[in-house]
Amino acid sequence: MEKGKLHMDPMIGRLFFNKYRLIKNIGGGSFGQIYSAKYKNNWFALKFEQKNQNQNLLENEGHIMSYLQSKYLPYIYSFGQSGEYNVLVMELMGKSLENIFENSNPKKFSVNCVAKLGLQMIEILRFIHNKNIIHRDIKPDNFVVGKNDKNKNLYLLDFGLAKKYRSSKTLEHYPMIKHKNLTGTARYASINALNGLSQSRRDDLEAVGYVLLYFLRGKLPWQGIRLKKKEERYNRIMEKKIETTPEELCKDFPQEFELYIKYCRGLEYTEDPDYIYLMKLFNNVLKGYSENIYDWDIINKTAITATTSSTSKKQLNFDEKKDNYKKNYHKKLSEQINYNVYNNQNFQILETKDLMLNTNRNKNENINNTFIDIKDFSGYMDEFTEEESIKNKNKYPNVFGKIQNKETLDKNFEINKKNNNDYCIII
């Protein structure tokens, strides 16, 4: 790449479902990528998964998050398919805890900050567990802070690996299965999950403990293990977790963190966790602190004060150069957006035929977006009687699929789609 030349993502500027224009890549992983998007001065997050990977995690995630919809999760607007992608449209949130942590200096959070985070994490897990769902991929990347006036609130993301752990009618646990492959992230996974046992509420809670100790210590004892075979690496991480006692793991920190780890490791597979007890542990830690702010709030305040008080010529020159760079960047970004949107030969953007600005659309154009409204489909997560099943199946012939039986939530949500056109389910 030439010096000074800005690398532009070919996805930037694309239009999805006739309205969401991609603005910036804000994250990614093995599942795909997440972009911020804008529509009528409102901001959204669009999560992409390539259809040819046959994972169908986004569909499962969209319906679970729609069912769980609460103040602890971003709002879910719709799920659909466009071109080669599965697309989930949701509320745009702030930075992840991993992103904030990686950019902190020193790379550690204070005890006060970690205890506050622990309180919110347990509160979130108590809510989703009471709705018969476990997350199974608790890690710093999946916790984010809100934007603007919600920047003190914590939210949980990424329910692609989430599942039911018990029947919603009887509250009876599903039986434990042994010799399972690990679901989740090895660094934060519970010892039982690494040992091949099916997960339950205890595993989400234990993972939270490792996330909190990661923030306190800066690094966990089992980080950095390098083995060629994944199974061998997982086994070594499990062995190291077993070798590391709660006392050793939580040394130099308040005893409440040690008690938390001991409690979670001691829970039985079907045991009801005492969330109140766990929250009291962190409330005890917070008794010695008066400020109701996070570490990054303090850093931001300091940065703002330093910036406003500095009027040196050097600082002014730097600001001027930065402003010029921003103007140049946004100019190139605007050019790239226009290029991506209107140069159909190079990027083959399906959505360009549906640009809202194109009021003279060809009537014979074979591009249709089918929006299936299931906002009032309140029975999604409940078992039905035979009569109710027939009624709902007739009401939603294209989307009902297998969801009349709550026990099949883990299976892919089936949608019959005759044509290869974009469509979107309004959740």
Image (spheres, helix red, strand yellow):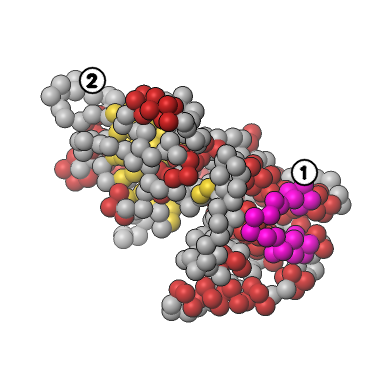
**Foreground of the two, 106 or 398:** 398
The residue shown at (69%, 64%) is: 265
Q: Which residue is mark 1?
A: 292
- Magenta region: 258-279
Q: Is residue 140 above or below residue 153?
A: below
> Residue 394: x and y, percent?
34, 25
Determine the residue located farthest toward the right in the rendered image. Answer: 288
Determine the residue located farthest toward the left in the rendered image. Answer: 364
Residue 208 can be seen in this image: no
> Residue 70: x and y, percent?
59, 35
The quarter of the picture where residue 240 lies is: bottom right
Say which mark, if any, is on residue 58: none
Q: Secondary structure at mark 1?
A: loop
* Quarter occupied by the N terminus: bottom left
The residue shown at (40%, 48%) is: 411
Kind of residue sitting beneath label 2: Thr
